[in-house]
Image (cartoon, rainbow, N blue to C red):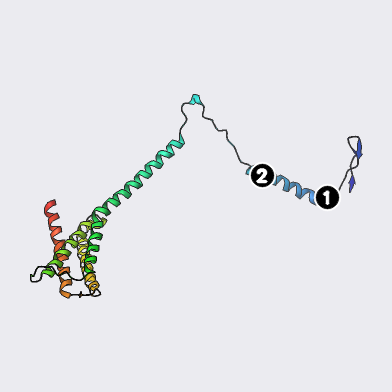
Amino acid sequence: MRELQPMKSNGVTCAVKMPTLQNSTLWTGPAARFSHSGARILKNMSPKTRPVKRCLEKDGPQPDFKAGFRGLGSEIRFQVSGISLEKLHKFIIYWFPIIVYCLLIYSQSSHPSPQSLPDWPFIDKLLHFAGYALLGALFLRAFNTTPIKHHLKLVLILSVLLSALYGISDEIHQSFVPFRTADVLDALSDILGSIAGVYLYHTNISIRDA
């Protein structure tokens, strides 16, 4: 320890002692170089600021950024809602009737066969044929609004296939309903009706667009 010059504070004399390190000549040089390099690094790391020009009234009207963001948000919401409304409209007009019609078929098949049908030969087969011809036409009508509408063969096959498969599933369903049985001829009538409905609807569209 070494003693420094006495210091006076409020009339009181104080003796201040500071520690001294031995062999100071061994670390003074490296410490000085480290302090200089550290100062240079800190100077390079310090943020550089630039003066920002404030918008004054004499410079003209200031931009309203909030209004711009509000306008952009409303435009995006309008586009999103427009897309949603378009999809909803297509669903209600083209796909919802298919759902309702399939539910009606399922409901009718869940009850015993009606006894008030006319006594005509093969009347039940004609009803199956006509019913699934309508279902096939509805499927084709709906698929014509989808992105695959330009693939004609695919659209025709899907329309016939979905309508026929629903007819076959309905016959399987009837096998579990009391006083009803699954009939292979009814399923065949469903398939033929699906083919006829898709063909007639496609022919009608082709003639109308020609």
Residue for point 66% across, 44% down:
42
157 and 16: which is toward the camera: 157
Q: Answer above or below: position of 96 versus 165.
A: above
Give the labeled residue for mark 2. 42
Secondary structure of the residue carrying numbered label 1: helix
Q: Residues within 10 Å of mark 2 (few under 14, many from 20)?
A: few
Q: Position of residue 124 (x, y in %)?
A: 13, 69
Return the disc, 2 or 1, that comes first in the chain's sequence. 1
Along the line of sight, the residue nearer the viewer: 59 or 35 = 59
- In the rendered image, residue 157, in percent from the top left (x then y), is placed at 20, 64
Q: Amino acid at mark 1?
A: Ser
Residue 151: give its label: none
Q: Which residue is mark 1?
A: 24
Q: Nearer the viewer, residue 186 or 79?
A: 186
Which quadrant of the view contains residue 4?
top right
Residue 168 percent coordinates (x, y): 21, 71
The residue located at (14%, 70%) in the rendering is 115
Residue drawn where x is 37% and y is 44% of the image: 77
In the orientation shown, which residue stands out farthest toward the top?
58
Alpha-carbon span between mark 2 and mark 1:
26 Å
Q: Secondary structure at mark 2?
A: helix
Residue 90 horizontal side relative to residue 18, left or right: left
From the image, state whether disc 2 or disc 1 is nearer to you.
2
Where in the figure is residue 5, as x and y percent of width and height?
A: 90, 39
- Disc tally is 2
Q: Amino acid at mark 2?
A: Leu
Judged left or right of residue 44, residue 208 is left
**Residues packed near mark 1 inside 10 Å, few (<14), some (14 to 19) or many (20 plus):** few
